[in-house]
Image (cartoon, rainbow, N blue to C red):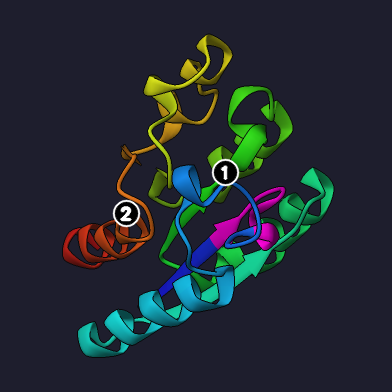
Amino acid sequence: MKILLIHGPNLNMLAKRDTALYGDKTLTEIDSLVKKRAQELGVEVLAFQSNSEGTLIDFIQAECPKADGIIINPGALTHYGYSLREALVDSALPVIEVHLSNIYAREEWRHKSVIAPIARGQISGLGWRGCVAALEILAAEI
């Protein structure tokens, strides 16, 4: 089983930007924690980050034929990334949307996700542990 772990814009800046909201772990550390749990579950994880919506779409299109599910933190694309949403739909894979911060406890504009309606579920506000939880859920369901 192979799961794509996709990180959107600005997530490469984790541990450097607002640690009160996003935590003090770097993206590399989060990926390592997810991959460690994946190994215990017998799951392969391919992690990818880009600040460009087109690059994220290219990655999904290239990798989805070889994958069984997607975990995605779309970052700010959560709220307006319709072409990213379409790539996720076209992948025909189960998707779990993850946010490190609780987007519903923040500014009003963050409350709307264009990804949530096409996802199996959304995990918001649990920090890096949300990525691990999403992995465990997908591994159990696939």
Residue tagged 2: 130
Q: Is residue 115 magenta?
A: no
Of residue 133 and residue 13, the one placed in the foreground of this image is: 13
Q: Residues within 10 Å of mark 2 (few under 14, many from 20)?
A: many
Q: Is residue 34 above or below residue 17?
A: below
- Which residue sits at x=73%, y=50%? 57
Residue tagged 1: 88
* Left/right of residue 135 with respect to residue 84 in the rendered view: left
Image quadrant occupied by the N terminus = bottom left
- Which residue sits at x=54%, y=38%? 89
Residue 62 — which label?
Answer: none
N-term mark: 2 or 1 = 1
Picture coordinates of residue 123, whole percent (x, y): 32, 42
Helix, strand or loop under label 2: helix
Q: Is residue 9 magenta?
A: yes
* Res 40 → quadrant: bottom left
* Left/right of residue 62 with respect to residue 104 in the rendered view: right
The magenta-colored residue range is 6-13
Of residue 47 and residue 58, the one placed in the foreground of this image is: 47
* Residue type, mark 1 in image: Leu
- Which residue sits at x=50%, y=16%? 112
